[in-house]
Amino acid sequence: MSCTSIFAQEFTGYVKKLDSILVPIFQAKVEITEGAKPFASLKTYFDGSFKFKPNKNQQYTIKITYTAYFDTTYTISTDKNAEPSPATVTAVLKKDGMRLLGVIRSADENFPIKNATIVLRNVMTRQEDRITTGIDGSYNFKLEYETNYKVSIDKRSPGIINQYFDTTFYISTVGFDQPLDYKLDVSLPPIAENVTDVREGYNSARKPDNKNIKPAVDVVTKTYKPVVTKQDEPEPVTKSPDLSELQRRKAVEDSLQKAKTEATKKKSGDATASKKEKTKKQVDNPDVVIIRDEPVKKQPDTAQYSRAKAVEEAASDSVAKAKAVFEKNLVLKKAAEDSIARSKAETEKALAIKKAQQDSADKAIAIKKRASEDSLARVVMAAHKKSTEDSLVRVKVEIERSRAIKKTRQDSLDKASAMLKKKVSEDSLKRVVSAARKKATEDSLARVKAEIETGLALKKAQQDSTVKAIAMLKKKA
């Protein structure tokens, strides 16, 4: 076995959240593909890291997924020594819109409920999403903006049936346009031992014609309302006593007052009758002296008095309970208003922090873009300046060369002229010199023109190469 395979270098990756302090993500899913075939499936540690040993001369595609965040994919490659390039990568995940998350617990033990199915239904499109809780009782839904939802616990789910009462509530994302986690924990009360709540059966009292058909279990009316605890929203305020309750209390008070009035009237009537009877006896027997005495008070009806007193006490208790409920409602309403104010303040603070983070990210991107543009401009200017200087040097060399050639030709013409002066006459010498000078001048002009055209062609080729280099630099940037 070679030393390279023994000390093969590991690739280390990190997964973090896109926030101000880059919090590591625990248990993010990492899928690794070697070429076109699966290589490994990992989970991140507490510090958001994961490691694996790659093979040599391979290319790996790494896909990172985590609930409530956008997926991220990147690639790495290895050389003949199985050394990865790059050796480490930090992936920063961005939040994926609005989320509804929480834990379903039992109200009596405050313990997570396993295998409870929670249903999220879009009120407008009637589309449903279902999640069955695991051992931690948690759920996590993705929410759309500007939408109303109905959330319910399915009483037919294995973790709920015949054990806990179900519940239903509504949430809304209308007015939100930024990523936000809406946390909502649900506490379900347990069903009493003598109460059965099942998914099958019917109420036999509503179908007297089918008495011969014995149902599996009769449906029993629920008397216990589940409790829903919202962390981002206040608890619903208890409703005030309805009109029927107030009317019932008023009727009890009226009946009590009527009973008192009738008892007073009856007492007055009995006293008047006793007085008339005594007066009549005195008239019938004038020899008998009757000493007038106070009329005997008739004892009231004890049963009727007890009933009236009980009714009065019941009415007083009902009024006291109504007063207590009203005061409790006032306290709950104030607590709800305070919770709404706190939730609103926290939401505004979160939005402000999010906006500041977005502004800082935009500034960083703008600075990076400006630096890249400045670097590209400097490279282009340097290339253009160098090509211009090279072109000027070449033109200068060509001009000096043309001047040297012209001087050499002039010297040759002067020598030929001197020789001709000796051999021919002055007139013929002038004609010969004139013709030679004319021809030499035309040849020199033609050569200079050709050299200038060559210099222009070279300059154009250099400009084309400069334009191509600029285009390649822009493409790489």
Image (cartoon, grey):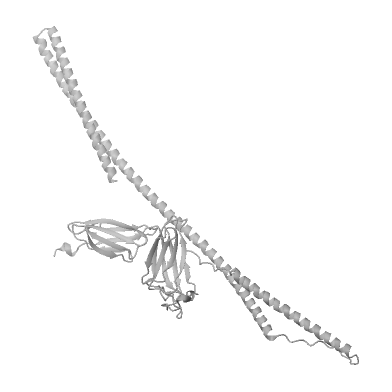
Quadrant of the rendered image containing residue 36: bottom left
Residue occupying the point 26% across, 33% down: 388
Relative to 92, is 345 on the left or the right? right
465 or 221, which is in the foreground?
221
Q: Position of residue 90 (x, y in %)?
A: 31, 58
Residue occupying the point 21% across, 30% down: 457
Residue occupying the point 91% across, 92% down: 287
Q: Position of residue 442 (x, y in %)?
A: 18, 18
Quarter placement of the N terminus = bottom left
Q: Quick check: can you spot residue 463?
A: yes
Residue occupying the point 29% across, 57% down: 73
Q: Position of residue 192 (x, y in %)?
A: 46, 79
When the figure is inspected, residue 436 is found, relative to residue 278, above or below; the finding is above
Residue that sits furthest to the left in the current view = 423
Relative to 444, is 107 on the left or the right? right
When the figure is inspected, residue 61 is found, relative to residue 476, above or below; the finding is below
Relative to 223, is 119 on the left or the right? left
174 or 414, which is in the foreground?
174
Q: Quick check: can you spot residue 394?
A: no
When the figure is inspected, residue 421 is found, relative to residue 319, above or below; the finding is above
Q: Position of residue 474 (x, y in %)?
A: 29, 43
When the figure is inspected, residue 220 is found, relative to residue 93, above or below; the finding is below
Residue that sits furthest to the bottom in the current view = 288
Relative to 395, is 187 on the left or the right? right
Quadrant of the rendered image containing residue 265: bottom right
Quadrant of the rendered image containing residue 325: bottom right
